[in-house]
Image: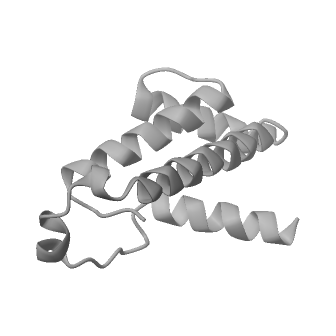
Amino acid sequence: MGKTTSVQTQVARALNGQVEVLSARDHHRHVPKHAHPELTLALEERLRRATLILAHTYATYATFPSVMSNFEQDVQGRFGTVLPAPRLAEEVIRLSELVAQAQNVPRY
C-alpha cells in the first residue's frame, strides 16, 4: 500500500504542476507526433493508469466524511458540479492534458 500511496502522491504532484518538465522546445518543434507512434501509445497508457489511480484515490475519500465534505466543495467550485470518482478522474486528466497542450509541454 505504501508504494500505491507514493504513486498517487507523484500523480497528484504532477497534476498540480509541482513537477517541472524540462524540454528542448526547438528540438521537438519540427518532429511531427505521428513520427513517434510508440510515444503516443506510451502516453495514452500512462494517462489511463493515472485515471485509474485518481479514480481510486477519489473513491477512497468517500470513506472519510470530513475529507469528503471538503473534497466535494472543492470539486463543486472547480467543475461546477459534484462528479462520481471515475468521471472526476477523467475530467481532471482531460483538463491536465488541455493545459499541457496549450503550454506545449512535451509528455513522454
Q: Residue furthest top?
A: 81
Question: From the viewer's perspective, is residue 57 above or below residue 13?
Answer: above
Q: Quadrant of the N terminus?
A: bottom right
Is 9 positioned to the left or the right of 5 in the image?
left
Q: Quadrant of the C terminus?
A: bottom left
Query: Where does the image place residue 11, in percent across and percent down from the top left?
Result: 58, 61
| Closer-to-camera residue (34/81) | 34
The residue under the point 65% across, 30% down is 86
- The image's colour scheme reads one colour
For the image, the number of numbered tags is 0
Query: Where does the image place residue 70, in percent across and percent down from the top left?
Result: 62, 40
Name the image quarter holding residue 88: top right
Query: Where does the image place residue 17, in percent across and percent down from the top left?
Result: 39, 64
Name the image quarter holding residue 67: top right
Query: Where does the image place residue 3, in percent across and percent down from the top left?
Result: 80, 71
The residue under the point 48% across, 40% down is 92
| Closer-to-camera residue (14/22) | 22
Q: Residue furthest right?
A: 1
